[in-house]
Image (spheres, helix red, strand yellow):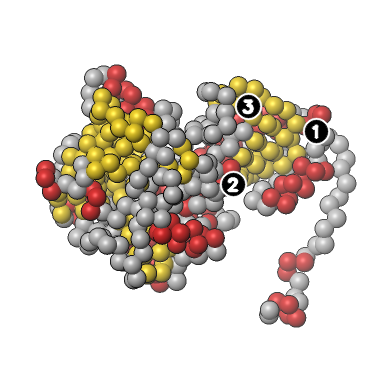
Amino acid sequence: MPYQDLRAFLTALRNSGDLVDITRPIALKYDIAKALAKTSSIQGPALMFTNTGTAFPLVAGVYGNRRLALKAFEATEQTIHEKVLKGINNPIAPVDHKGAPPCQEVVLTGDAIDVTKLPVPTYSPKDGGPYITAGMVVSENPETGTPDIGNYRFQVHGPKELGVFSAPNHRFGKNIAHATAMGKQLHGAIVIGVDPLTMYSGQVQSSDSTNDWFVAGGLRGSPVELAKAVSNDMKVPAYAEIVIEFTVDTNSQKVEGPLGEYTGYYTAASPKPVAQITAITHRRGAIFQGLLTGKPITENHVLKQIPFETSLLHQLQAQFPTITDISVNSSGGVQVYLVIAMKPRYEGEARHAILAAMASNLHPKWVIAVDPDIDIRSSAEVEWAQSFRVKPSEDVFVVDRTATAPLDPYTDGAFSSSVGIDATKPFGVEFPDVAEVPGWRDFDLPEIDKR
């Protein structure tokens, strides 16, 4: 069974030694980020900060490394893509929660609304202020009512105001633009602290017509329980820790940013729409959740990686069935650097697969195709394939004026360019055997095995 809520997952992490409680005071301004960067550097545990200077504890690092990600999916490296693909291919409809939802045990409206009472960290020295980074945003297409869930940033401007940023090609950004064109205010909710698979489902790449609650149910293998929001008609996860309901006012803008983003660079400050908070609801003893972003690799990149990889694998395998795996490298922000493992069926197929990947929603700058014998998550093995299976004049090509990845600091306006490298063995040509010592991994050598 999937974890019902964040608390169940945190219990599992604590029992396995993957969650550490920090009871001494840790400053929300910068020091939380320092602690998260340190545990991330050693592939360490998630951290629960119980002394935040507020009434709420703060947990972060929940998605801090691949080990914790696999634990959330209850999968291994060998089973993860199969499990996620099964979830994507078998969506499950949400259900209404029966009775009073836990996420509304405490309801704050009117003058009681004050988001500054939550332990919202300031992560980087040049950030424009405290940022909610682990919020799962629920919004709807204002015309069709199709719900979208995704991870977006919000800057705390004041007790009832948040700065809004969503790239225009993302569904939340499209919903804001659509509502503005219709002369409507967009209602939304920031959901903080949900079960891990619902959080991961917000990263799955899908069409604008997809009801994301079905995707979440598929990944969980059971329906998400939803409850009606307090100040609008939207549905939110019943077991969320905290829900911040809002309307987006595009006519009222304030300077938002900078923020150290997934690219590893600060995004410039600029006027952006304001979210007016209409209600805050939470569980008793609610746990706030943080998420470190910035120079790769951070928790932000780990959260995206498995859903991004499996989404793209799902899309490309329909056209190229001999693709066995895809790596969307964390060092490229889980966006601009892809490695594809495949066995070409005909000369030029690897190039076709590379071009299809370039046209995907990730907008990568670098796409490398290798044979399935290459470990695509080992930079050394990929570099080996590039070194000795590539004839640069024939196997390396550049496609100009490709779409740019969001927030890429080095692009030509709305366009970029992409490099394709076919590092598969030449098709139909006899190639030398690999000089590798067979069976060494299983060789019994107690003299060093016990070290």
* Mark positioned earlier in the residue sequence (3 or 1): 1
User: How crowded is the residue under tag 1: few (<14 C-alpha within 10 Å), some, or many (20+)?
Assistant: few
Query: Could you tell me the amino acid type at mark 3?
Result: Ser
Quadrant, the N terminus: bottom left
Residue sitting at x 18%, y 39%: 278
Between the C-alphas of marks 2 and 3, the distance is 19 Å
| Tag 3 residue | 417
Q: Which of 347 and 182 is in front in this view?
A: 182
| Amino acid on which the number 1 mark rests in the picture | Pro
Give how far across and how far down residue 158 sits, in percent: 24, 43
**Whole-percent x, y for residue 64 in the image:** 47, 57
The residue depicted at 18 percent of the width and 36 percent of the height is 233
Give the CA separation, mark 3 to mark 1: 18 Å
The residue carrying pointer 2 sits among few (fewer than 14), some (14 to 19) or many (20 or more) residues within 10 Å by Cα, namely some
Q: Mark 2 points at which residue?
A: 331
Please say whether residue 196 is visible from this viewpoint: no
Three-letter amino acid code of the residue under disc 2: Ser
- The mark lying in front, picked from 1 and 2, is 2
Q: Which residue corresponds to mark 1?
A: 392
SS class of the residue under badge 3? strand
Q: With 69 as the anchor, is 3 left or right in this view?
A: left
Relative height, residue 445 to residue 253 (above, below): below
In the rendered structure, are the residues bearing label 3 and label 1 in contact, judged by CB atoms less than 8 Å apart?
A: no
Rendered-image quadrant of the C terminus: bottom right
